[in-house]
Amino acid sequence: MSAQAGLAAQPSHSPDQSRALLRSPAQCLRHGFLQALPFILVLLPFGMLFGVVATDAGLDLPQILGFTVLVLAGASQFTAVQLLTDQAPALVVIVSAIAVNLRMAMYSASLVPWLGGARPRDRAWISYVLIDQTYALAIQHYEKHPRLSMGQRIGYFLGAALATCPFWLLATLLGVWLGNAIPEGWALDFAMPVTFLALIAPMLRSPAHVAAALVAVVASLAFAFLPSGLGLFVAAPLAMLAGAGVEVLMERRNGARL
């Protein structure tokens, strides 16, 4: 093979991909930090709302801070506090919070091809700061730039975490301190659906994704009558089965065409 033919056979990279490959881990950290900053616009009211709700539920400041630092997952925190307010049994509270957070297991599985080779200590802190925002940013960045080194991937993830996780704690503190001063007309709860819409919409890239999302919405509404948020236990597996079923059908169809 000639030299020119060998060069032609090498995969070409877009200017954006080439710039990403040339970044140092520190530059990747800064890049991830900057890309995650817009999420503060929804994390701030979301965290403040949790501080208000937790205070109204009777939790004191150390309990709220411990809850936030140890769990670091807004949806499950809201679920647990709401169930505690409704006097739900402790077992239902624990199981419901775990069920809401089961998506983190799926997040972790999808990140294994990109971060599975990292050092154990890096995997440990990544698992702690793995939230919806850091996952959504990281997985899209890694898929867009698959040739990044492990150091570059970890740097980007750390940057995204530094821009989101501390602000979640700060927002919770503001909700605790300023809860009584926040006007009732301020609908802070808008941040929750807006956050998840912003995260999910860009990731609906295949018929399987769309099918899972639609089934999740329909099933959640259909089983909303169940007590203590138990409709999530029904909607989540139905959505996963729907997505997996559509993906299998698509693979069979593609295989038949070949």
Image (cartoon, rainbow, N blue to C red):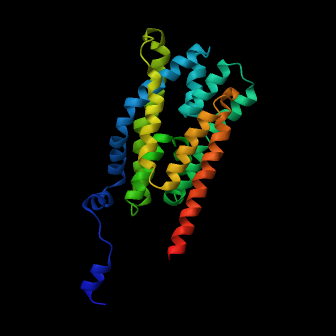
Q: Residue at x 32, y 50 (%)?
A: 27
Is residue 219 depicted above or below 251 in this figure?
above
Is residue 44 in sight in this rendering?
Answer: yes
| Quarter of image, res 232 | top right
> Depth check: 215 or 78 in front?
215
Question: Is residue 176 positioned above or below 199 on the image?
Answer: above
Q: Give x and y (percent) for residue 209.
A: 51, 51
Give the quadrant of residue 5.
bottom left
Provide residue 214's location: percent of width, then percent of height: 53, 44
Q: Nearer the viewer, residue 89 or 168?
A: 89
Residue at x 45%, y 11% (from the top left corner)? 184
The N terminus: image quadrant: bottom left
Tell me residue 42's x, y (percent): 41, 30
- The picture quadrant where one finds residue 44 is top left
Q: Is residue 223 left or right of residue 22?
A: right
Which residue in the rendered view is the most extreme toward the bottom? 1
Q: Is residue 123 left or right of residue 23?
A: right
* Horizontal side, residue 110 vs residue 81: left or right: left
Left-right relation of 122 to 162: right
What residue is shown at x 65% (from left), y 30% (from top)?
Answer: 229
Can you say whether 62 is above or below 244 in the image?
above
Q: Is residue 154 visible?
A: no
**Which residue is drawn at the image coordinates 31% and 56% (left, top)?**
23
**164 vs 3: above or below:** above
Front in this rendered view, residue 209 or 60: 209
